[in-house]
């Protein structure tokens, strides 16, 4: 993965149900590749946390806190992003 967590853009190879694609992340939190950050991204990230092999996500966009790991801190960060957008 390349990029930093400061400007919200990342680059990585991502495997999806359609194969491996260029994992450019244009919007941090856009986990499920639907071009919008919403509650469904949170569902996808939560599913990935509980069973990583059960769902394919854009891991570049899932690393919310920029620590190069996808974990509970990213889930909490995504919840905060979604709640702050709804205000």
Image (tube, rainbow, N blue to C red):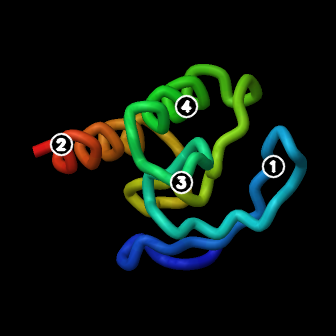
Q: In the current view of this chain or complex, which residue is farthest to the left?
A: 87
Q: Quadrant of the C terminus?
A: top left
Q: Left or right of 76: which side holds 46?
A: right
The reply to whether callout 2 and callout 1 are in contact (CB within 8 Å) is: no
Question: How many C-alpha atoms fall within 10 Å of the one at disc 3: few (<14), some, or many (≥20)?
Answer: few
Per the model, the C-alpha gap separating discs 1 and 3 is 17 Å
Per the model, the C-alpha gap separating discs 3 and 2 is 17 Å
Q: Left or right of 10: which side holds 76?
A: left
Q: Position of residue 76 (x, y in %)?
A: 31, 38
Q: Is residue 35 above or below residue 55?
A: below
Q: Position of residue 59 (x, y in %)?
A: 62, 51
72 or 25: nearer the eye?
A: 25
Q: Is residue 84 above or below residue 43?
A: below
The reply to whether callout 1 and callout 3 are in contact (CB within 8 Å) is: no
- Judged from the image, the secondary structure of the residue bearing numbered disc 4 is helix
Label disc, if present, on residue 86 of the rendered structure: 2
Q: Left or right of 72: which side holds 11?
A: right
Q: Nearer the viewer, mark 2 or mark 4?
A: 2
Q: In the current view of this chain or complex, which residue is farthest to the right?
A: 19
The residue drawn where x is 75% and y is 55% is 14
Q: Nearer the viewer, mark 2 or mark 1?
A: 2
- Judged from the image, the secondary structure of the residue bearing numbered disc 3 is loop
Q: Which residue is mark 1?
A: 15
Label disc, if present, on residue 64 of the rendered structure: none
Per the model, the C-alpha gap separating discs 4 and 3 is 14 Å
Q: Which residue is mark 3?
A: 35
Label disc, if present, on residue 44 of the rendered structure: 4
Per the model, the C-alpha gap separating discs 2 and 1 is 30 Å
């Amino acid at each position: 993965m390349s990029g930093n967590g400061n400007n919200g853009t990342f680059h990585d190879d991502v495997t999806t149900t359609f194969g491996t694609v260029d994992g450019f992340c244009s919007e941090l939190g856009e986990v499920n590749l639907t071009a919008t950050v919403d509650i469904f991204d949170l569902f996808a990230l939560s599913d990935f946390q509980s069973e990583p092999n059960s769902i394919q996500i854009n891991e570049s966009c899932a690393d919310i806190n920029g620590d190069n790991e996808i974990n509970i801190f990213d889930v909490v960060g995504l919840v905060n992003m979604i709640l702050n957008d709804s205000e």
